[in-house]
Image (cartoon, coloured by chain):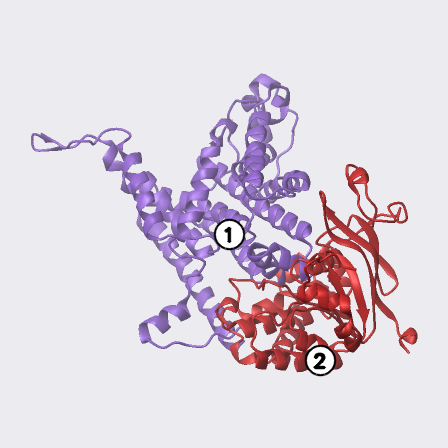
């Protein structure tokens, strides 16, 4: 118990240090630095990946509906927070739209999660009775339907049809998304270590045994699905803030696959794995490999292969290599753990105490 | 003598038919409070299927199960099964009662599995801890924000106590699947006990054990029965164990009850000997 408290304390101190570091970084570097773009997008993807990991890695439900819940979250946030005086301009084809009020950003963010969770609840009722691949197909179908539905002309006064939504409140610095994500991830971590989290892991390990131990499968699956979607919705809203404008057409199933890739590379069932992988993913897809897309000359010699699109080829090869080398992801189902690292360094094998 | 005791479990006309195959045929039996009752029979006789009908894993084609007087399972042949049904009393149980396994466990019926089903990625302690989840009073919100810390502490204490009861407190932090076979079996029993059952269903607890271990297990079952005031329903192949600890024995073969009674009676029953040893013409007489 005591040791547990110490590691909590160390964790909090590290978190505080991280925020101080981010603040210093923000002061030191010009705001247009690529690093900030990566950090912002990376941390938002981290939240969405962790929310997906809660479902796929910790509960063992293979769902591919994440983009669907993100688009719900993004649209809920945008619709509720666009300032009233902007609405006439943005909803120009729909007489200014039906919503004629604007909520504060933080309330909009919460509503984004709640609406996504509500949809998850409705979708979960029939869909969670399915297993493995069938569940994946059903949730994927839902995500596609919701994306098409939002663009439906008849819903125009609410969603602006297939036109952009923009001018909703956004963040400028990097501290805002980091703080929001830190709170959300902390809640997910607390949940996973609670008695409900243990029940979810039991369902993942053996459904029959879990049920025989008195765990109501449907309730716990539904709970996991709704919670995961709640945070996916918040993640979607944060992504909307990051982008500054949203359009349903961009929330394709490819987005779900990106998140799934992060979860798999980071390790199914590892929170820290998902976080590390999402920063690596965003950084290498948007930044580190950029040079591969540009033609490059060394003297008069033109580097072969380098042209627009080559980046994705290299990126795919790297992903294949990572998956082959780390079968169970970078972290497996382990967590980044200070105690284990010190044990590793000092060569001592300590005994775990959970009590 | 038995009549004064509370009837813990009562199966009437339980029939489980998969397509044309009748796995359990018209099985009626009962278990009184405080008894150790064994269900035996050759391989494939339908013992585990009968267990699964009681615990809600399967929905029997016909028949009823009562637990402490309350109906927990009741069904009659419907749909396609109406024409295929090969058992008796097809119209007797019109009421349909169907509980999921978790609900039946909550009522006080815990079980172990024939082919050990521990939670693979969890330690021995965590395996038992999970089984304390069903008596929670917390909801997801209070549990997440640790407003249930007192209950959480009680859960951990109970889990540790159950581990000590089965003698596994020293391996609490080992991965469940890394334990030797016999300890895994005990861990399953600890996990079942942590659900605070009144009726404990053991599905071949001595499978794969040597005679010494089997002997210890028999003593252990009697000990926990007395300590926790349990009633035990046992499926077993090891005759020595069954004869040693059972108060009464039911014998089934090809899904049908062929004998029941005290251990000695069953042992001398010609039908049972036939079922186990086989004769040229193995039609049960």
Q: Residue at x 33, y 45 (%)?
A: A35
Horizontally, residue B19 falls left or right of residue B210, namely right
Kindly state the secondary structure of the residue where label 2 is placed: helix
| Foreground label between 2 and 1 | 2
The quadrant of the rendering that contains the N terminus of chain A is: bottom right
Q: Nearer the viewer, residue B246 or A168?
A: B246
**Residue B46's spot in the image, x, y percent?**
70, 57
Chain identifier of the residue bearing label 2 in the image = B
Figure chain in red: B
Which color has been applied to chain A in this rendered view? purple
Kindly state the secondary structure of the residue where label 1 is placed: helix
Q: Is residue B14 above or below residue A128?
A: below
Q: Is residue B47 above or below residue A172?
A: below
- Give the alpha-carbon distance from disc 2 to disc 1, as whole Å: 46 Å
**Residue assigned mark 1:** A57
Horizontally, residue B285 falls left or right of residue B277, namely right
**Residue B89's spot in the image, x, y percent?**
88, 49
Q: In the rendering, which numbered label is found on residue A81?
A: none
Horizontally, residue A61 falls left or right of residue A263, namely right
Q: Nearer the viewer, residue A121 or B239?
A: B239
**Residue A28's spot in the image, x, y percent?**
31, 51
**Residue A198's spot in the image, x, y percent?**
59, 61
**Residue assigned mark 2:** B244
Q: Residue at x 52, y 48 (%)?
A: A56
Q: Residue at x 66, y 41 (%)?
A: A118
Q: Is residue A77 visible?
A: no
């Amino acid at each position: 118990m005591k040791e547990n408290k110490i590691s909590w304390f160390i964790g909090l101190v590290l978190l505080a240090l991280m925020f101080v570091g981010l603040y210093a970084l923000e002061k030191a570097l010009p705001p247009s630095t690529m690093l900030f773009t990566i950090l912002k997008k990376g941390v938002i993807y981290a939240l969405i990946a962790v929310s997906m990991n809660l479902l796929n890695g910790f509960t063992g439900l293979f769902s591919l509906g994440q983009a669907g819940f993100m688009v719900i979250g993004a649209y809920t946030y945008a619709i509720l927070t666009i300032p009233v005086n902007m609405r006439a301009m943005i909803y120009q084809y729909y007489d200014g739209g039906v919503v004629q009020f604007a909520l504060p950003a933080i309330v909009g963010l919460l509503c984004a999660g709640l609406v996504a969770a509500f949809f998850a609840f409705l979708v979960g009722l029939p869909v969670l009775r399915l297993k493995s691949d069938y569940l994946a197909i059903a949730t994927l179908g839902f995500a596609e339907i919701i994306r098409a539905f939002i663009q439906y002309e008849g819903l125009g006064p609410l969603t602006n049809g297939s036109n952009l939504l923009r001018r909703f409140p956004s963040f400028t610095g990097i501290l805002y998304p980091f703080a929001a994500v830190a709170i959300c991830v902390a809640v997910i971590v607390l949940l996973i270590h609670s008695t409900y989290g243990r029940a979810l892991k039991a369902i993942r390990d053996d459904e029959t045994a879990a049920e025989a131990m008195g765990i109501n499968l449907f309730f716990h699956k539904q709970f996991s699905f709704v919670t995961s979607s709640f945070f996916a919705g918040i993640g979607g809203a944060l992504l909307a803030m990051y982008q500054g404008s949203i359009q349903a057409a961009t929330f394709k199933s490819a987005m779900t696959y990106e998140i799934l890739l992060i979860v798999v590379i980071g390790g199914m069932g590892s929170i820290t794995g998902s976080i590390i992988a999402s920063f690596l993913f965003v950084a290498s897809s948007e930044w580190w490999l950029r040079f591969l897309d540009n033609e490059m000359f060394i003297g008069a010699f033109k580097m072969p292969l380098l042209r627009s699109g080559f980046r994705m080829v290299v990126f795919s090869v790297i992903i294949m290599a990572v998956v082959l080398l780390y079968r169970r992801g970078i972290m497996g189902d382990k967590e980044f753990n200070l105690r284990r690292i010190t044990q590793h360094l000092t060569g001592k094998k300590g005994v775990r105490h959970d009590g | 003598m038995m009549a004064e005791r509370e009837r813990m479990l009562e199966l009437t006309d339980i029939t489980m038919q998969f397509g044309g195959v009748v796995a359990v045929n018209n099985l009626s039996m009962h278990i009184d409070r405080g008894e150790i009752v064994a269900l035996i029979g050759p391989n494939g006789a339908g013992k585990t299927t009968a267990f699964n009908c009681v615990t809600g894993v399967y929905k029997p084609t016909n028949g009823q199960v009562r637990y402490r007087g309350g109906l927990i399972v009741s069904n009659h042949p419907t749909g396609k099964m109406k024409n295929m049904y090969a058992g008796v009393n097809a119209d007797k149980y019109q009421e349909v009662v169907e509980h999921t396994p978790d609900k039946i466990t909550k009522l006080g019926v815990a079980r172990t599995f024939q082919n050990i089903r521990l939670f693979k990625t969890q330690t021995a302690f965590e395996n038992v801890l999970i089984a304390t989840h069903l008596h929670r009073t917390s909801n997801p919100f209070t549990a997440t924000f640790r407003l249930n810390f007192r209950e959480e502490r009680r859960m951990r204490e109970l889990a540790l106590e159950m581990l000590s009861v089965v003698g596994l407190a020293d391996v609490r932090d080992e991965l469940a699947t890394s334990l030797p076979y016999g300890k895994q079996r005990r861990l399953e029993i600890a996990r079942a006990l942590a659900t605070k059952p009144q009726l404990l269903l053991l599905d071949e607890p001595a499978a794969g054990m040597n005679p010494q271990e089997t002997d210890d297990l028999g003593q252990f079952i009697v000990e926990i029965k007395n300590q926790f005031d349990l009633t035990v329903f046992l499926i077993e192949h090891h005759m020595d164990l069954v004869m040693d600890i059972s108060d009464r024995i039911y014998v089934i073969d090809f899904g049908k009850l062929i004998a029941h009674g005290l251990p000695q009676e069953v042992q001398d029953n010609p039908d049972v000997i036939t079922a186990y040893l086989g004769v040229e013409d193995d039609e049960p007489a």
